[in-house]
Amino acid sequence: MRNNSKIFYGEFIGSCFLVMIIVGSGIMAQNLTEDIAVMLIANALATGAGLFVLITSIGDISGAHFNPVVTMAMYLTKKIKKNLIIIYISAQISGCLLGVMLANFMFELPVIELSQKVRPGINIFIAELIATFGLIFLIFGSLKSGKLAVASSVATYITAGYWFTSSTSFANPAVAIARTFTDTFTGINYLNTPSYIIAEIIGGILAVYLIKKIFL
């Protein structure tokens, strides 16, 4: 059984570094080029690489959820107990918020700044739903193959998700909240953040429904 404090620290540190990687690589790319495609390539590769090492190194500590929807799915499939939900989600959200502040600070930007980047539309809502559905489904599909299989699957899927979804595959409510506070390449306007979160929750619930029929 995992120690509750270790779970919190693992999720907090992992979530913090995940957002630093996402936002920081986006800012670096934005500083180096005006080509949007090159920016997205750099951002996607950095995020995929970061996810692989974070899941590999922290998986044995907390399970390396870094994502409230993953935690929700683990609870709904009885892989974690109810009392752990608040520990996971509080660590994830607070870690992500620290991560965005540190990323902004490292690049000499305001530590907290509301994003002006608008990401509206039912098409983007559906894209984010699909992105999250796929993420949860593949996590459970690869669980029995071990930590490295999960890390590889999540990392490569999210890298692909940057490109095949119009939402650029946030697939994570805590990350969506954090990205509201950076007015850079990876940001999201606060008016669009709730729709992303709703889409992610729906995608996660649909994935769990199918997972119970196939994998459990």
Image: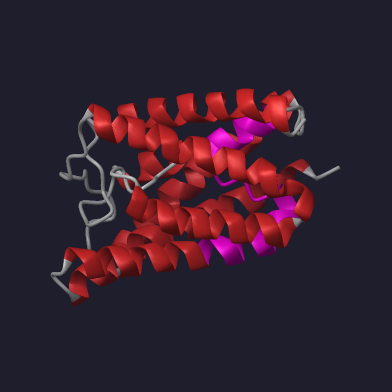
Q: From the image, which quarter does the C terminus lie in?
A: top right
**Which of the two residues, 160 or 58, is positioned nearer the viewer here?**
160
Q: Position of residue 161 (x, y in %)?
A: 41, 51
Residue 33 in view here: yes
* Residue at position x 66%, y 30% in the image: 211
**Which is more toward the observer, 126 or 1?**
126
Residue 84 on image: x %, y %: 71, 32
**Residue shown at the point (74%, 54%) measured from the top left:** 61
Residue 90: in sight, yes or no?
Answer: no
Q: Position of residue 40 (x, y in %)?
A: 28, 63
Q: How is the image coloured?
A: secondary structure
User: Viewed as shown, does residue 131 lie left or right of 118?
Assistant: right
Return the residue found at the far front: 214
Residue located 19% across and 72% down the image: 31
Height in image: 151 above or below 29? Answer: above
- In the image, which residues are magenta? 50-75
Q: With 75 as the anchor, is 168 left or right in this view?
A: left
